[in-house]
Image (tube, helix red, strand yellow):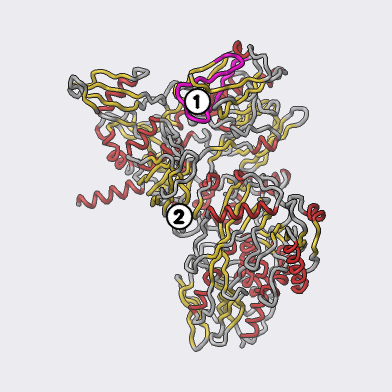
Amino acid sequence: MALSADGSRILEFTCIVCPMGCRLRAILEGGEVRSVEGNRCPRGVIYAQNEIEPKRIIITVIKVSGGNLPVVSVKTSEPIPKEMIPEAMKTLSKTIVQAPIKIGQIIIKDFLGLKVNVVATRNVDPAQIG
Amino acid sequence: MGGLIRVAIIGAGVVGASIARVLSMFEDLEVHLVEKEADVGWGVSKANTGIIHAGYDDEPDLYPLRAKLCAEGNRIWHEWVKDLDIPVRWCGSLVLAFNDEEEKILEDLLNRGVRNGVSNLEIIDHERLKVLEPNSSENAKAALWAPTAGQISPWDAVIALVENSLTNGVRLHLSTEVKGIKISGGQVCGLETNKSFLEVDCVINAAGLYADKISEMAGLGGYRIKPRKGEYLIFDRDAEPKVSRIIFPTPTPISKGVVVTTTTDGNLMIGPSAQDLPENLREDKSNTYDGLKLVWESASNLVKKLPPRNKVIRFFAGLRPEPSGGDFIIRDYDEVFGFIEASGMRSPGLTSAPAVAYMILEMLKAKFDFNPKPKAGWNKCRRRIKRFSEMTFEERSKVVNENPGYGRIVCVDELVTEAEIVEAIRKGATTIDGVKFRTRACMGACQGSSCMHKVAAILARELNMPLWMVSLRGSGTEIGIGDVKALLRDKNELEGSRRG
Amino acid sequence: MEENYDLAIIGGGPAGLASSIKAWDLGIESIVLFEESNLLGGVLPQCIHPGFGLHYFREDLTGPEFAAKLIDRLKNTGVKILSGSYAERLEVRSSGEKKILGYRYGEAFRVKCRAVIYAAGCRERSRFEVNILGDRPAGVYTAGEAQTLMDIYGILPGSEIVVVGSGDVGLIMARRFALEGADVKAVVEVMPYPGGLTRNIVQCLEDFHIPLYLSCMVTEIKGLRRVEGVRIVKVDENFNPIRGSENYLKCDAVILAVGLKPRVDLLIKAGALIDEATGGPVVNDWLETTIPGVFAAGNVLVINDLVDYAAEQGERAAESAARFIREGLPALKFKRVILGRNVRLIVPHLVSCVQDVIFYGRVGKPEENVQVRFEEIGRAFKLPIARPSEMFRFKVSAEDLMKLHNEKMTVNVVKV
């Protein structure tokens, strides 16, 4: 973070939206993003805005009961604030979901009150009996 | 003395297992084979060159037991491998001489071999050497050719001996560590172990690297065992060039030197180095830069060419139990009746094992003044798990029809099927290494990165245990520390209890 | 089972799946797909993170979602899908007829076919292949193996982790462990620069405060029964250890992300020529190996960075196989592609010069502001940042290739 001549702050970081990894410069005024440089596509601007309050998609597995696999892979439908990750992981460590599970199925709605869903990313069939 | 004699053999390595087999041939002997690891043969027996030596190496005036029992053991192995279905290559061995002094030593070895009762030894010239071993070094001037030597799979040998022993009534106690030996009135009466007390009349010490500690427990301990580390490198099965015979350098007084050989499974193997370790480091089987470098350089001298370094799929190390005095310690004692040593089994321990077993039998008979009857129905035969990889396509079609699990390939590199793995588990494997040594799963180029988890899943299913508790080689080597949420859950619980 | 097919595809990962679908769409009706696992998708079902399909589906998908799209599509075709089936051997008769011998639960099979697409993927290198000495305790895993244990079987391989290798696989596993509550001590990288994408350095390491040790090597693992720690040392430009820079990291699991090797055993036994640089088969611009009618695609052909490329190669192989089956491939004189300055590997190795070709390659050393130049035809592509860990992919048109009059075409990476 640097101060420019007119008192606005400059934040430099790397965009992670796609594999290009553009080096961005965001110029902030009063805590708001006034402009962004260095991005090769418009998603960089959105990313810069998000970096002020960084967010991440959570990727993990949660336990399954009655399935042909013991865990199902899940993701959050939208990124959540980075600092909520530990709490999110703790909550998900207690979650058990019943097979069958379809890709896209919502496992937890409005996760942690963040208006974001936890969604299955893998199909799980019921366990074969016998 | 009449009636039943209860015998405990400490150590299910090749020596202990050979003794168990021989003792199992008789009535009136109740034989217990006691092993501290989770499976058999995991000490010295699984990490050595696997050579059945011809028997010219050991000077009878210096090491009379080694000299006598090696040549005798060699002869017995020729029969045992057939009865027990143990993979072996009777390829013979060559000791190479590169100069006149070494040629003189070959003469000494030849004479010594004849004295020890070894047959068909010959000193051959460079031309004949090239015919017997095309990959032998151009610089070798002559060689000692010993056609009776062979390459065996040492862990296969132990597993075979134990299976046959079990068939014939021997009782196996795994994960059972001897903590003390109870002596009463100058006589052995039993073993204190980490499990229960085992009441026996005779204890045979075949405890390998820890034999001196066991001997001390009996109040004896008149010798020390020092570990000598030997490092090895193993090449991929398709790595060329290999060798068709076992190639030795001219020996020094300390060691037979670094060997180049092809294992019974077709992998070129080089080693061992010889590094004496401090007495207290009996678990140091680490591979070192210097050790592997020495092995590579020494091996390179023996052959025209080694395969490229990037064809090495594994390196490992083993420890030899070097006894003070250098010779095997095979004896009993007046002061402690019933305690018999079969220790200090450094090279040629593997070769001598069957002969040691018969010698121990005689010692037992003499000590207990007893002539046991041969056991009716004693079965000399044992068959190993049929290997899918060794069958033709037609044979494979047939076995797959009979046992559908043969159609599920678990280890792709070695072509090991689920049926073989299940059979290994039924035969006593409870760990990944147990399955590995009985089937060759995880022994290929990938070294388990693609197949270990599949083997683990089969173990978990067959033994009805949680997957994370399946171990590589017993307690403390579990493949996981819990289910994937184990750490997060513990944190939950910790925090929950803190909040009260 | 003894059956006849027009086309056999070996490998049900992204390359194999994509090629099956494409071959069907092109009208080949008699197709069989062999996959050794019971699950289709290859390594995708365990790659639970996003970043897949940005090119191929124009969506940011997780691995299992990418696989599911292909599998759903495949299930709507008439391709015979044989999962749990291992193709062990390929026999090629002089007539060109191919036989695949293999096994599945309860049967050994011999299948005849006219063309084969080999998409068997790759395996991971072990600690022995990168000379990590010391003890051989429990707790040493390759990254993919750890990923399988965690994200397919749901078990945790360790609680204090050291990751060897900073390629994307290593970085992603570092994050996986950190997310599940493990203490990731470090990612150790022998090069002076990280191997993976910058976005992964940020999301996997910086987010979790995991140190990245560059120009460092793990020399030894210590541990009696289970891993207790690793010895690491700093290295100089020639990868020689710098004396006095040794350090010890306590840990109970070592995760190795130290390279992938194409699984080419079946091809070697069948007589195909292998390229030392890629570790995969030598192919022409039909993606045909040196065995006529046997094609290769995906990680077995060349280790790909993006699953999109594997799928694309699968489709290309399918186009070629379809043509081979229908009318045969034209007998043409192939020109060799030569590795020039700073090109470590490139695929395909031979060009016919009658069609567009997509080249996949890697530089040997990192450079900036370079061009990848196909010299004899005067065609160049800009590459602002060239890294060995980031594959370049360029399409050269038939028109340009027809300008090639020499026997060979040199590819150079040069500074602008």
Say which quarter of the image contains residue A30: top left
In the image, taking residue C271 as reference, residue B43 lies left or right, namely left
Q: Chain of mark 2?
A: C
Left or right: where does residue C271 sit relative to residue B177? right
The reply, left or right, for residue B97 in relation to residue B419 is: right
Between label 2 and label 1, give the one nearer the viewer: 2
Residue C222: image tag: 2
Disc 1 secondary structure class: helix
Q: Which comes before the other along the chain, label 2 or label 1?
A: 2
Q: Which mark is residue C370?
A: none
Disc 1 sits on a residue from what chain?
Answer: C
Residue position for label 1: C308
Give how far apart the Cα atoms at labels 2 and 1 are.
40 Å
* Residue C83 within the segment the image draws in magenta: no
Residue C336 drawn at (x, y percent) = 66, 23
Q: Position of residue B405 (x, y in %)?
A: 61, 47
| Highlighted range, magenta | C355-379
Question: In terms of depth relative to the viewer, which is nearer, C126 or B390?
Answer: C126
Q: Residue at x 24, y 21 (%)?
A: A27
Horizontal and vertical percent for residue C375? 59, 17
Main secondary structure of the magenta stretch: strand
Q: Position of residue C20 (x, y in %)?
A: 58, 26
B364 relative to C220, above or below: below
- Which residue type does callout 2 highlight? Lys
Q: Nearer the viewer, residue B116 or B184?
A: B116
The amino acid sitting under disc 1 is Asp
Q: Quadrant of the N terminus of chain C?
A: top right
Estimate how packed mark 2 is, as few (under 14), some (14 to 19) or many (20 or more) residues with alpha carbons within 10 Å: many
**Relative depth, front residue between C390 and A128:** C390
